[in-house]
Image (cartoon, helix red, strand yellow):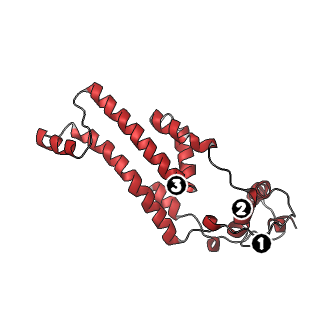
Amino acid sequence: AMILALALSQPSSSALSSPPSGRIGPHSARRASAQCMAAGSVGVQPEPLPLGDEAPLTPAARVKRALTFWGRVVPILGAYKVVEVAADLPAPLRFAVGLSGVRIPETETESGEVYEELHEWGSQRLESTIQELKGFYVKTGQVISTRVDLFPEQYTSRLASLQDSLDPMPAAVVREVIERELLQGEPISSLFA
């Protein structure tokens, strides 16, 4: 739910106010520094790029992305829950759950094996979903990959590829997005005028 809330709460360019002209405070100084690093060299105005997939998402597109994410993640969570509660089910219900394709452990040793299979399957599914959706979901995957204390090894090792194996975004695209989203169309050089 938190991921959904954060994905839907990403501000659009109309919700941002332009920075005060001529003043850079402590918070905007850090932002300006980051923007300069992203922009390359200050004062050089690149031609606007066709951003294609980099255009701001509409609210409907945000909802669609969130539904895609949850549509792929809920089955992972559901499989874990089924295995967890299946041990306490009466025999006829355990048989019915087994027909659904979820392997139900009979012993502690088998339970470990079932969870290992679930971790492998779930981590593959989550990684492919994150790789497809990119953006906010990549950042979430990067955070998960660092939390070896909370997540199974299959998840943290598979999602570690999100740390350094992604294609870099061209600096010109970053500059264009910053100018459009954060500066409402103003050139980055206007921060230092």
Name the residue that disc number 2 marks.
173
Question: Which amino acid type is shown beneath numbered disc 3?
Answer: Glu
Distance from label 3 to label 1 (Cα)? 31 Å
Q: Quadrant of residue 187?
A: bottom right
x%, y% of residue 91?
A: 12, 38
Residue 36: horizontal and vertical position, in percent?
80, 57
The residue under the point 46% across, 35% down is: 154
Q: Secondary structure at mark 2?
A: helix
Query: Which kind of residue does numbered mark 2 sit on?
Result: Val
Q: Which residue is mark 1?
A: 186
Indicate which disc, 3 or 2, sits on the residue closer to the N terminus.
3
Q: Earlier in the sequence, mark 3 or mark 1?
A: 3
Residue to which mark 3 is pinned: 132
User: Viewer-nearest of labels 2 and 1?
Assistant: 2
**Which SS class for mark 1?**
loop
Residue type (three-letter) at the residue carrying disc 1: Glu
Point out the image quarter for the N terminus: bottom left
Q: Could you tell me which residue is drawn at 61 percent across and 42 percent down?
A: 163
Task: Indicate the quadrant containing the C terminus: top left, top right, bottom left or bottom right.
Answer: bottom right
Residue drawn where x is 60% and y is 65% of the image: 53
In the rendered view, does 94 fall on the left or right side of 176?
left
34 shown above or below 64: above
Q: CA distance from mark 3 to mark 2?
A: 19 Å
Left or right of 123 in this view: 81 = left
x then y, percent, for residue 135: 58, 56
Mark 1 packing: few (<14 Cα in 10 Å), some, or many (20+)? Answer: some
Query: Is 61 located above or below residue 135 in the figure?
Result: below
Observer-nearest residue: 77 or 117? 117
Q: Quadrant of residue 68?
A: bottom left
Determine whether label 2 and label 1 are within 8 Å by CB.
no
Taking the image as shown, residue 132 lies to the left or right of residue 92, namely right
